[in-house]
Image (tube, rainbow, N blue to C red):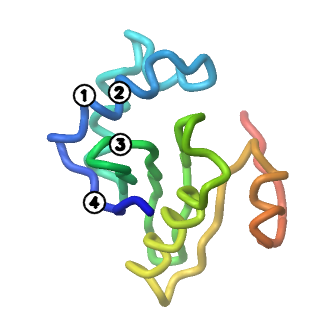
Amino acid sequence: MGNILRYDKQHESALLSLLINESDWQTFTNEQNLKIFKEALLTSETFICEHNHEICGYLRALVDAFGLYVSELYVAPNYRNQGYGKKLLQKLKKEHPQKNLYILSDEDLYYQKLGLKQIGSVFQL
């Protein structure tokens, strides 16, 4: 199965080409937010997943003294249900074994399928 690598600038165009056509990801890839998103990818704890040297997914998390907060987890449609999302989450946890991992999700069924416990919800002001 694919390799998990720490994201860096060289991955930018391949990752963006995956996301640009996904309607759910236009919040990040639209012209107004693209520059902010590119910076967030570099300044957050970001990992990519590769299959045959092509990016097939990524994870971006925020890290502080209290825990890890997964902001985005994406796996390209052709690679879903093959364990790539789980592998990305495991890599993040392996990098920070002493921290609790929290996921900001709108895909609750996916995380429930992985056996994760739901402990709250997210609200926007």
Using the numbered discs, state the Cα–Cα distance from disc 2 to disc 4 in whole angstroms: 16 Å
x%, y% of residue 119?
A: 83, 68
Q: Quadrant of the N terminus?
A: bottom left
Q: Earlier in the sequence, mark 3 or mark 1?
A: 1
Q: Name the outermost residue toward the top.
A: 31
Kindly state the secondary structure of the residue where label 3 is placed: strand
Q: Is residue 37 left or right of residue 25?
A: left
Kindly state the secondary structure of the residue where label 2 is placed: helix
Q: Amino acid at mark 2?
A: Leu
Q: Which residue is mark 3?
A: 55
Residue in view at x 45 percent, y 77 percent: 65
Q: Which residue is mark 1?
A: 13
Residue in view at x 77 percent, y 42 percent: 123
Q: Quadrant of the C terminus?
A: top right
Using the numbered discs, state the Cα–Cα distance from disc 4 to disc 1 in whole angstroms: 15 Å
Kindly state the secondary structure of the residue where label 4 is placed: strand
> Does the CB distance between marks 1 and 2 fall below 8 Å?
yes
Q: Which residue is mark 4?
A: 6
x%, y% of residue 7?
A: 27, 52
Q: Earlier in the sequence, mark 3 or mark 4?
A: 4
Q: Residues within 10 Å of mark 4 (few under 14, many from 20)?
A: some
